[in-house]
Image (cartoon, rainbow, N blue to C red):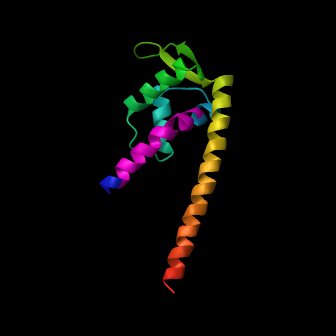
C-alpha cells in the first residue's frame, strides 16, 4: 500500500494544478475552500500547505486573479478566480489529460487481452 501511496503522490504532483483550476472554473474560492472541495472530491490526503504553495505558483504564473476579501476572523482572505490565461491553461490540461487517458486505456486493454490469451 505504501508504494501505491507514493505513486499517487507523484501522479498528483503533475495534475493537481489542473484539478485546482477546474475547481476554480466552477466558482472562485479561497485556499481552505479549495482544500475542502478537493477532499469532497476524494483527495483526502492533500495537505493544506500543498494547496497554498500551488496557489502561490498559479498566481505568479498569471493563471488566476486574486481579490482580498475581509474576513470575520483574522486577516483578509485571498479569493482566487480563474482568469482567461487560466482558462486557456485548463483547456490545454483537459486536452492533454484526454490524450493520456485514451492511450493509457489502450495500453491497459491490450495488457488485459494479453493476460486473458495467456490463460487459455
Q: Is residue 44 visible?
A: no
In percent of width and height, residue 50 lies at 40, 31
In percent of width and height, residue 80 lies at 56, 22
Count of all numbered marks drawn on residues in the image? 0
* Residue situated in front as seen by the camera: 41 or 63: 63
As drawn, the residue found furthest toward the bottom would be 120
Magenta segment includes 11: yes
Magenta segment includes 43: no
Quadrant in the picture for residue 106:
bottom right
Q: Is residue 92 visible?
A: yes
* Residue situated in front as seen by the camera: 73 or 97: 97
Q: Residue at x 51, y 45 (%)?
A: 41
Quarter in which the N terminus is drawn: bottom left
**What range of the chain is rendered magenta?**
4-21
Q: Residue at x 63, y 31 (%)?
A: 89
As drawn, the residue found furthest toward the left would be 2
In percent of width and height, residue 108 lies at 55, 64
Q: Residue at x 45, y 16 (%)?
A: 72
User: In the rendered view, does 92 fall on the left or right side of 52?
Assistant: right
In percent of width and height, residue 54 lies at 46, 28
Q: Is residue 59 above or below residue 37?
A: above
* Residue situated in front as seen by the camera: 45 or 85: 85
Amino acid at each position: 500500500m505504501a508504494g501505491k501511496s507514493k505513486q499517487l503522490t507523484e501522479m498528483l504532483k503533475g495534475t493537481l494544478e489542473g484539478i485546482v483550476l477546474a475547481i476554480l472554473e466552477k466558482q472562485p474560492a479561497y485556499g481552505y475552500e479549495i482544500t475542502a472541495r478537493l477532499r469532497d472530491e476524494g483527495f483526502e490526503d492533500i495537505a493544506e500547505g500543498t494547496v497554498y504553495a500551488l496557489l502561490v505558483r498559479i498566481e505568479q504564473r498569471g493563471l488566476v486573479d486574486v481579490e482580498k476579501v475581509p474576513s470575520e476572523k483574522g486577516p483578509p482572505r485571498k479569493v482566487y478566480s480563474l482568469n482567461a490565461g487560466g482558462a486557456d491553461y485548463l483547456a490545454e490540461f483537459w486536452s492533454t489529460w484526454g490524450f493520456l487517458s485514451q492511450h493509457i486505456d489502450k495500453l491497459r486493454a491490450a495488457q488485459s487481452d494479453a493476460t486473458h490469451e495467456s490463460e487459455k
